Image: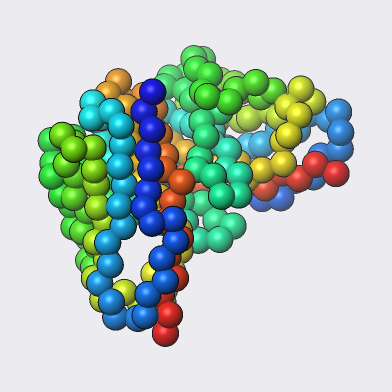
C-alpha cells in the first residue's frame, strides 16, 4: 500500500540528547513537510522540502535540522538546542500544488 | 502573513443532525483548501481538497464549499453519526504552492 511511514511512534529523550525521527513515503511525491502539534494548537511548520537536496525553514525551525538525500526520505533531528521539544510530530507529503497526505505521527517526550 | 481561524472551537450534537463547520482565512491568494479529520493521537486524514478554481467538493455525506473573495470555507456534514466524532482541521495552501497554513481545528462530538 502507498503511504507515509513515521517511526518511532513514541520516543523519549533525556536533556541534552539529539534524537532523529524517521519519515519515509512511497507515493513518489516531490514535496515533504514536518509539522509540530501542541495540545490545543494548530499545526506549525518546521521544515519543508520541494526537491531532493533542497529544503527550507518553516515558522519554527530553530533547534531542528533535516536532510533530503533521497526522494522517499525526510528525517527530522530534534537537537539539544530545542528547549521545549515535547510534542506530537507529523510528517506529510504532496505533489506540487496538490493534496497533502500525513503519516501517523511520532510523539516525543523529554524526561 | 496568512492566518486561518475555525469556528466553533468545539461542537456537540445529537446523532442524525446536519452540521456546518467554518474556516476563515485572511489572504485570498490561495492555491488550494483542504479539510482533514484527526482522531486522538493519530495523524491527519484528508477529507476533501478544493482547488482554487473550484467552488465546492462532495464526498459521501460531506460537502465543502470555498469562497475565496470572502476568505471562507464551510464543511457540511449530513446526518451525523457517532463515528464522525473527531477534530476537523482546514488548511490553505499559499499562492506560491509551497506551504500550508492550518487552522486550530473544531472538536466535534456526535452523541448517540
Q: Can you give x and y, in whole percent of width and height, for residue B110 in the image?
A: 41, 75
Q: Which image quadrant for residue A111?
A: top right
Residue B19 lies, with reference to residue A37, above or below; the image says: below
Residue B109 lies, with reference to residue A83, above or below; the image says: below
Q: Which residue is depicted at the point 41% across and 66% down?
A: B11
Q: Which residue is depicted at the point 54% across and 44% down?
A: A41
Q: Can you give x and y, in whole percent of width and height, for residue B41 in the image?
A: 59, 57
Q: Can you give x and y, in whole percent of width and height, for residue A4 in the image?
A: 49, 44
Q: Which image quadrant for residue B30?
A: top left
Q: Residue furthest top?
A: A54
Residue A16 lies, with reference to residue B55, above or below; the image says: above
Q: Residue furthest bottom?
A: B112
Q: Can you give x and y, in whole percent of width and height, for residue A62 in the image?
A: 65, 21
Q: Which residue is depicted at the point 86% across and 33% down?
A: A15
Indicate left or right for A88 with B95 as reference: right
Q: Is residue B89 visible?
A: yes
In what quadrant of the picture does the N terminus of chain B appear?
top left
Indicate left or right for B57 with A29 as reference: left
Q: Which residue is depicted at the point 52% across and 34% down?
A: A44
Amino acid at each position: 500500500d502507498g503511504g507515509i511511514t513515521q517511526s518511532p511512534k513514541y520516543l523519549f529523550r533525556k536533556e541534552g540528547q539529539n534524537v532523529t525521527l524517521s519519515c519515509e513515503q512511497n507515493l513518489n511525491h516531490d514535496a515533504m513537510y514536518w509539522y509540530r502539534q501542541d495540545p490545543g494548537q494548530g499545526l506549525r511548520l518546521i521544515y519543508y522540502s520541494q526537491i531532493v537536496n533542497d529544503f527550507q525553514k518553516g515558522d519554527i525551525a530553530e533547534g531542528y535540522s533535516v536532510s533530503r538525500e533521497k526522494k522517499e526520505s525526510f528525517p527530522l533531528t530534534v537537537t539539544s538546542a530545542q528547549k521545549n521539544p515535547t510534542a506530537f510530530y507529523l510528517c506529510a507529503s504532496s505533489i506540487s500544488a496538490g493534496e497533502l497526505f500525513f503519516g501517523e505521527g511520532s510523539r516525543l517526550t523529554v524526561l | 502573513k496568512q492566518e486561518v481561524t475555525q469556528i466553533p472551537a468545539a461542537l456537540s450534537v445529537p446523532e442524525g443532525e446536519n452540521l456546518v463547520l467554518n474556516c476563515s482565512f485572511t489572504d485570498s491568494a490561495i492555491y488550494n483548501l483542504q479539510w482533514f479529520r484527526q482522531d486522538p493521537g493519530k495523524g491527519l486524514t484528508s477529507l476533501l481538497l478544493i482547488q482554487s478554481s473550484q467552488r465546492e467538493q462532495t464526498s459521501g455525506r460531506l460537502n465543502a464549499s470555498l469562497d475565496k473573495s470572502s476568505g471562507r470555507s464551510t464543511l457540511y456534514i449530513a446526518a451525523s453519526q457517532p463515528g464522525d466524532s473527531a477534530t476537523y482541521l482546514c488548511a490553505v495552501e499559499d499562492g506560491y504552492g509551497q506551504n500550508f497554513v492550518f487552522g486550530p481545528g473544531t472538536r466535534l462530538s456526535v452523541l448517540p
